[in-house]
Every structure is written in structure tokens, then in C-alpha cells.
Amino acid sequence: MVAPVPMVEILRGDFLESVHSGHAVVCRADGEIVEAWGDPHAVVLPRSSSKMLQALPLVESGVADARGLTGEHLALACASHNGAPIHVEKVNAWLKDIGCGDDDFRCGPQESRDDALRLEMIRAHREPCRVHNNCSGKHAGFLTLSQHLGGGAEYCQIDHPVQQACLSAFEEVTGETSPGFGIDGCSAPNHAVTLHGMARAMAFFAAAEEGGDTRQDAAARLRNAMMTYPELVAGEGRACTELMRACGGRVALKTGAEAFFIAIIPEKKLGVALKIADGTTRGAEAAIAAVLVKLGVLDPAHPAAQKFMTPKIRNWDGLVTGAIRPAEILR
């Protein structure tokens, strides 16, 4: 196995204080690797970066259309959202439309990441609900698909029809047999794959065309929903949302826990998969921004690019004490 390579540097004054190393792959839909750093064959858990793969059965089964799901619903199905009012209200409306409630979710309650809503709930002594969970949109999709497939209430179990449909889609689009799975933060199975396989899957999404075969059409609709509604995929202040806006609707981005990130670039028909080995979010955000700049779809002078790729480090008194920057291989 090839060791992870330095991808992001942390400076304090003139001193290199820390380094975030990792792996990344840029791939075409036919599986050809365009560029790679580290080990393309590293086995990874893509975490929430795999949500668009988990949402494929929702669309290609026909239930999304049967239930009248819009682009906003599809963006939420792919989201790791902030649990802000815009997310909570839309997911609750979706639940009501399918005759379900918060207790039907199998993701745990989670505090909202929206400061105003979280403080309002604390002041009102209101406990967070499952709908506030960052994965509640994905779980609304699972519930919708489960009704269509006639599955039972425990839709996160690996042998449930929903999860079997997700596994089939995952393996077919990555082009690999998954060696196993872990349980994600939202209780759903998360299947392992090589970084190359994940990049290949993202390239499939990049090359997919609406009106193509059933799977291509589903992939294109999910990708386009993410690019159209970046505020639903993550939320204000988040890298996914801000970098998608900075790319002008030309790229779909999705973070995953433990410093995973993917990019889908339709105009170049390229997919990107990236993993920072130490699991640090700041490293993954800086690295994915640098890759987007390198591929010519993100202006390095854009404020969002600078915010995530080359931010200043300040101490508690507001003094600039250092900086984050891409390592030489990404510059």
C-alpha cells in the first residue's frame, strides 16, 4: 500500500507546524485515472460522500416520481444539512406527505447546527428531534423507498430491502464488490470501497445524462439537484454549499465524516474522491478546494476558495498567527 502523501500544510509564523496527508483520485467514467495522489487502491469508508449513491434506488425505482418528489427533495436526500429551519421544515413536510413522523426515523436526535435555531430551542427547553439530524433527508428517502418496496420499519438493517437496493447500486456504480461495511453516524450501513472505485462512481454521475437509461437519468437528476440547491446539501457557512456556489453551479460537492470529500464535474466528465488520513475536516476542505482550482473549475481568488483553501489562522485575540495552504503537490 502506498503511504498517504502531504496534501495540506499548517504554518505558524514561518514554521511548518503540522501536515495533513491523504489520498485523492481524479477519474473518468470509464475508470481511467487522470491524476492521483497517494494510493488510489486505499480502502475507505466514504461516509456521507456516498449519499447520492444511496439515493439512486429512490429515483430509479420510480417512487420519486410517483410521490411527486422535486429537486429540493432529491438535494435533501443527498444532504448532510445543518438542521436549520429551511431543512427541518422541508423534511417535516416530506414526512407528512408520506404519512410518517419523527419517530419513524432511525437516525438519532441531533442538535441543530444552525446557531439561531439551537439557541432558540435551548431557551425554550426543547429537545432536538430526529429531523434535526444532518442525515434526516437521506432517511426520508429511505422511508419513501421502504414504503414502495414493502419493507418493515427497521430500514437501516443490512438485510432490509432498502439497504440491499443501496448495496446493489453502490457496487454496480463503483465497479467493485464491497469488502464490508461500517455503521454510519445515522445508523445506516456505509459500504467500503477503494478510492478509485469511489472516484469512478462520481465520474459516472458527472457523465450521466437526463433522459438516458434509467440509472443515468437518476444520477443526472440527483447531481443536478445538488448543484441547483447547494443551500440544502449542507447550509450557510459550510464548505459544500459555499464552494458549489463559488463554482457557479458547475460542480456538485459532498463532504463525508472523517475528512472525506467528493466532487462531480459534469463539464469535464470527471469524478474526484479524496480522503485525509487523520480525519481532520480543515484538511479535507483545503485539499478539495485546491483540487478544484487545479482542475480549472474554481477561481483561487474567489472569497470561498480563499476561506477554505488558504485561510488565515487567528488566535483568541484576533491576531494572525499562521495559515493553512495546499502542499506543494497541489499548488
Image (tube, rainbow, N blue to C red):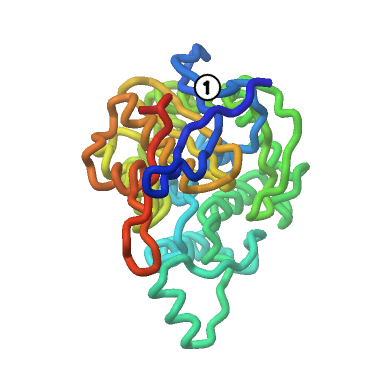
* Of the pair 19 and 3, the residue shown nearer to us: 19
Residue 119 place in picture, x, y as percent: 44, 79
In the displayed structure, 174 sits above or below 323; it is above
Among all residues in the image, which is located at the extreme bottom?
124
Q: Is residue 276 left or right of residue 13?
A: right
User: Can you identify the residue that label 1 sits on?
Assistant: 200
* Of the pair 251 and 68, the residue shown nearer to us: 251
Check the picture and name the quadrant holding the N terminus.
top right
Measuring 64% from the left and 54% from the top, which residue is drawn there? 185
Measuring 29% from the left and 46% from the top, which residue is drawn there? 304
Q: Is residue 273 left or right of residue 194?
A: left
Measuring 61% from the left and 68% from the top, which residue is drawn there? 109
Residue 68 in view of the camera? no
Label 1 amino acid?
A: Arg
* Of the pair 57 and 148, the residue shown nearer to us: 57
Among all residues in the image, which is located at the extreme right?
159
Check the picture and name the quadrant holding the C terminus.
top left
